[in-house]
Image: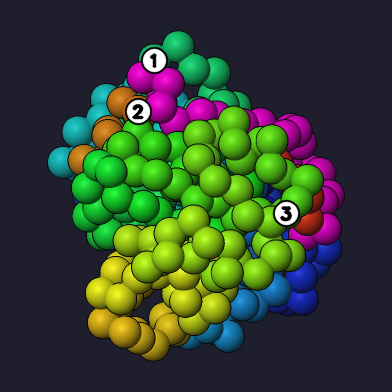
Amino acid sequence: MRALVARRLDGPATAELIETPIPEPGAGQVRIKVAAAAVNPVDLATTDGTLIDYNLSAPREQFGIGWDVAGTVDAAGPGADLPVGTAVIGVADLLGRPLKTHAEYVVLNASAVAPAPAGLEFVEASTFGLNALTAHQALNALALSAGQTLLVTGAAGGVGGYAVELGKHCGLTVVATAGEDDEQFVRSLGADHFVPRSADVTAAVHAVFPAGVDGLVDAAVIGIGAQESVRNGGVHAHVVAGPPPTSLRGITVFPVFINANRADLLEVVRLVEAGVISTRVADTYSLEDGRTAYERLAKGGVRGRLVLIP
């Protein structure tokens, strides 16, 4: 089979398309024939060595690329509970694997796989798993109640956009930050208040909520600067990209690193089917053009997901 991998770790242009044997599933695993696989910022971090720099993965000869996948189960190992032929989505959340979802086939733990949303094409189904699951788990960590206030940084991105949608679904008042040109898009996700990231975000937040917001999903990984908008004793979800910031003024900081598990995946799928979580496709590419997709994402400004189709 063909697969995209990172060996030189010198950026997206150095990703390699290789021929490699089709992997076999072990106990509790399924093999998915990949129909579509989204491209995410973490894939760029795989190609340039950032995951190693942040001690999230040990150096190795080859890194597989890709976290999101949609496709069909075509083989199941002993104890796997998803029958062959099931249309599924999955998240390859284990770091350092030599082969991941940007390939013609991928083997995942069955616990990191769930039936795909009913009626959704594979391209759309491949776009939300990693980011919506991360946002869902971040909000679960914050445990805010309806009527409380939430600040979301990076609200035009994958995790941030889903945090806005899920925050509104939970009855929160959402303040969102993003680029000035993204205001209409972010408000369409449900944001109650918008602050351009070029502005003094802390001053803008305190102008509306003098004590600060109750919680923060820091999808842009700003750190202490974003935490200044949180009230004393509030809560802060730090979407992991290095060490979490220091907890100040009694604020509880929750490092959030995705845990792909069936229960949360099923809940996210349910929310997609209910129209709470949207799917956003920016463009599609073949595996052969995978490097082009990576380089386009690296330039910034992409809204929605770029999707690889084997």
The residue under the point 69% across, 56% down is 196
Q: Quadrant of residue 61?
A: bottom right
Q: Quadrant of residue 269?
A: top left
Up/down of 183 relative to 152, above or below: above
Q: In the displayed structure, does residue 138 sit left or right of residue 96?
A: left
Q: Which residue is mark 3?
A: 179
The percent coordinates of residue 250 (x first, y second) are 26, 82
Mark 3: which amino acid? Answer: Gly
- Quarter containing the C terminus: top right
The percent coordinates of residue 135 (x first, y second) are 41, 50
Q: Is 285 contained in the magenta span?
A: yes
Question: Which dot, 1 or 2, sits closer to the camera?
Answer: 2
Query: Observer-nearest residue: 102 or 293?
Result: 293
Up/down of 129 relative to 209, above or below: above
The residue under the point 60% across, 48% down is 194
Measure the C-alpha gap from mark 2 to mark 3. 27 Å
Q: Which residue is mark 1?
A: 118
Q: In the displayed structure, does residue 29 sit left or right of residue 2?
A: left
The percent coordinates of residue 55 (x first, y second) are 48, 85
Looking at this view, name the residue that lies furthest to the left.
Answer: 79
Callout 1: few (<14), some (14-19), or many (20+) C-alpha neighbours within 10 Å? few
Are dots 2 and 3 in contact, CB under 8 Å?
no
Q: Which residue is mark 2?
A: 271
Q: Is 86 contained in the magenta span?
A: no
Q: In this picture, which residue range is highlighted in magenta?
A: 272-299
- Quarter containing the N terminus: top right
Measure the C-alpha gap from mark 1 to mark 3. 34 Å
The residue under the point 27% across, 33% down is 266
